[in-house]
Image (spheres, helix red, strand yellow):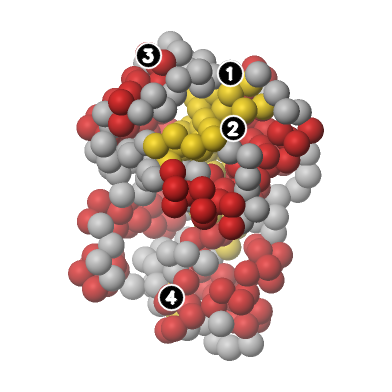
Amino acid sequence: MKTLCITGATGNVGIETLRFLIAAQQQNPEIRIIAAVQRADSAKKLLESKGLSGLEYRELDMMNPDSAESNWVFKDVEYLFLMRPPQISDVPKYIQPIVQAAERAGVRHVVFLSLKGVEEQTRTPHYAIEQVLRATIMKWTFLRPSFFMQNLTTTHREEIARRNEIFVPAGDGKTNFIDVQDIGEAAARVLLHAEKHINTAYSLTGAKSYTYNEVAELISQKLGRKIVYKNPSKLHFFFQKHFQERLPLSFVLVMIYLYHQTINGKADSYAPDLERLLGHPPTSIEDFLERNKQTWV
């Protein structure tokens, strides 16, 4: 029996990872899948509504690290998929105790959803988590994806749907976008064959990079109406996101930092790792926009 535990199971990446793991479980009943979620009842209802069944549920509140041991979340777990909730930036306070609880419970291998270029972005929580994992006796694999295409259908959905604009301070820098479905498939493949990926970091990217002007034009073509890239100042962006949209301060600051990296050209790069892990080309942004165009109607 191979026991896998997925944190962030109700998020975009978690759901797609579970989708591929459940498909593998149907071929091999020796795979045991545990969803670590904040509330088991609501998570079970959500995931089953998306056709994801056959899971075990354990409750883990990542804002309360003590729950990792009080609820026996990692008991019998061999392989852990770790994701950082966007609102958590204090790694020593929240994430490190959870990693230590996994280590004490006997977890063998942690696959962590990190950030592309994190080795040069030492101020990010992702970098701090990688260092915490390196300091344990557990094996690790770091998946470092570029910007999610799904940011356009989640974080930026309202501004596109209601204001016909993309509102990010990214200048004229190009961004490489990746589909979360591809990340989920890659994560599942690594978890299922972790022995092939010991202490390895993978940069996961789509096939091509775009400026936000180009993205706005592509969305305009799909929707048949004009979408404009606003390119606000960092101060204007901060005011809009934190004070008007009420996003958490730490989340907004991380966003500003990442978009600053885009301006500096750090988000514009391709790596072959994803295609090698999947065995097929990554999803194109054109296919993603076609698949999701009803989101902005």
* Mark 3 element type: helix
The Cα–Cα distance between marks 1 and 2, rounded to whole angstroms, is 20 Å
Seen at 49% across and 80% down, the residue is 161
Residue type for callout 4: Glu
Report which quarter residue 134 is drawn in.
Answer: top left
Of labels 2 and 4, the one closer to you: 2
Instruction: Of the two numbered discs 1 and 2 on the same chain, state the one appearing first in sequence.
Output: 2
Label 1 CA crowd tier, 10 Å (few <14, some 14–19, many 20+): some
- Residue to which mark 3 is pinned: 104
* Mark 2 or 3: the one toward you: 2
Give the residue displayed 55% in from the left and 51% down from the top.
47
N-terminal label among 2 and 3: 2
| In-front residue for pair 170/50 | 50
The quadrant holding residue 248 is: bottom left
The answer, for residue 121, to whether it is visible in the render is no
Mark 2: secondary structure? strand
Residue 63 visible in the snapshot: yes
Q: Residue at x 39, y 57 (%)?
A: 259
In the rendered image of this protein, does residue 188 appear above or below residue 196?
Answer: below
Which mark is in front, 1 or 4?
A: 4
- Distance between the alpha carbons at the discs numbered 2 and 4: 34 Å
In depth, the one of 119 and 238 nearer the eye is 238
Query: In the depicted view, which residue is nearer to us: 59 or 143?
Result: 59
> Which label is found at residue 158?
4
